[in-house]
Image (spheres, helix red, strand yellow):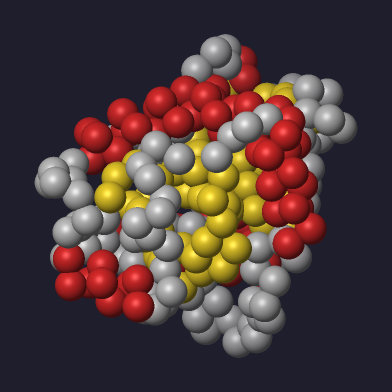
């Protein structure tokens, strides 16, 4: 009997998914071909054409807990709509996922949060100008967009394992260009601690579906005007790959206890 790609995900029986941002694919580098499900095998999912986004699900485990990794995402700046770019979240909910960890590579806007460290997202600014709920007339309460109770578990695990884990506000913009120094100053005045081009729409969609959400930014670089060097995607990927080791330890200390 031929098993569809969606059925493979459903039969894995995971209730937690982890969306991997740019440069974080090393977390699933050891997965075999049998553990991988390509996005192209699922018609409703868009492909991502951005370096560092492989475009596949990986069936994995952290300790005794089964998880589904989503290695890569589609972005608004690739020309996708808000609804299309969040199709992966809807699919994960359909195959039984109850909670999702969203990760991204971000520029740090807070001078106290140095590149190479991690920030747990406690709230966000949706500056993309759109929402996956447009035309759906769903009025979703976003007060607790990121689970405080789950976040406390991650913060406790980070402290116990001497992992630097900042907490702050993530600003999601359209991209694909990086921000200007003036825009970075504006974002800081609005209360942002990190800035990127993803995550906020996925969070909105996940909360609309009743999923529990945790969000993490790998702070890969100083935002424009805060450092001495120009920003490149290659540097973002390299820093993400290096920081992935700490995130793997954080996941093991938090999810691996179950």
The answer to which quarter of the image holds residue 84 is bottom left
Q: Residue at x 28, y 50 (%)?
A: 222
Residue 81 appears left or right of 157: left
The image shows a total of numbered marks equal to 0
The answer to which quarter of the image holds residue 143 is bottom right
Q: Nearer the viewer, residue 122 or 198?
A: 122
Q: Residue at x 43, y 74 (%)?
A: 191
Q: Is residue 152 above or below residue 218?
A: below
The C terminus lies in quadrant: top right
Q: Residue at x 74, y 44 (%)?
A: 156
The N terminus lies in quadrant: top right
Residue 218 in picture, x, y percent from top left: 44, 43
Residue 199 in picture, x, y percent from top left: 49, 58
Q: Is residue 20 above or below residue 193?
A: above
Looking at the image, which residue sits at the far right?
A: 258
Q: Is residue 190 above or below residue 161?
A: below
Q: Residue at x 38, y 45 (%)?
A: 114
Residue 240: in sight, yes or no? yes
Residue 205: in sight, yes or no? no
Residue 232 appears left or right of 123: left
Residue 213 in picture, x, y percent from top left: 67, 57
Residue 144 in picture, x, y percent from top left: 70, 71
Residue 71 appears left or right of 254: left
């Amino acid at each position: 009997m031929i098993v569809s790609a969606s059925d493979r995900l459903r039969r894995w029986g995971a209730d937690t998914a982890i969306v991997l941002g740019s440069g974080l694919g090393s977390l699933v580098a050891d997965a075999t071909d049998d553990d991988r499900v390509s996005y192209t095998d699922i018609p409703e999912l868009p492909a991502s054409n951005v370096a560092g986004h492989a475009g596949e699900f990986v069936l994995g485990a952290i300790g005794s807990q089964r998880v589904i990794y989503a290695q890569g995402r589609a972005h608004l700046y690739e020309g996708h709509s808000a609804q299309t770019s969040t199709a992966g979240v809807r699919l994960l909910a359909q195959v039984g996922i109850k909670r999702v960890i969203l990760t991204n590579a971000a520029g740090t806007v807070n001078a106290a949060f140095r590149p190479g460290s991690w920030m747990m997202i406690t709230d966000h600014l949706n500056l993309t100008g759109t929402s996956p709920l447009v035309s759906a007339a769903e009025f979703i309460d976003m007060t607790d967009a990121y689970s405080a109770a789950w976040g406390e578990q991650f913060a406790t695990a980070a402290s116990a394992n001497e992992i630097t884990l900042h907490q702050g506000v993530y600003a999601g913009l359209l991209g694909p260009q990086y921000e200007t120094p003036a825009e970075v100053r504006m974002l800081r005045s609005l209360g942002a601690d990190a800035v990127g081009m993803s995550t906020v729409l996925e969070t909105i969609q996940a909360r609309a579906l009743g999923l529990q959400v945790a969000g993490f930014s790998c702070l890969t670089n100083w935002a424009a005007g805060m450092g001495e060097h120009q920003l490149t995607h290659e540097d973002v990927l390299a820093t993400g790959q290096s920081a992935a080791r700490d995130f793997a330890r954080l996941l093991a200390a938090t999810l691996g206890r179950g």
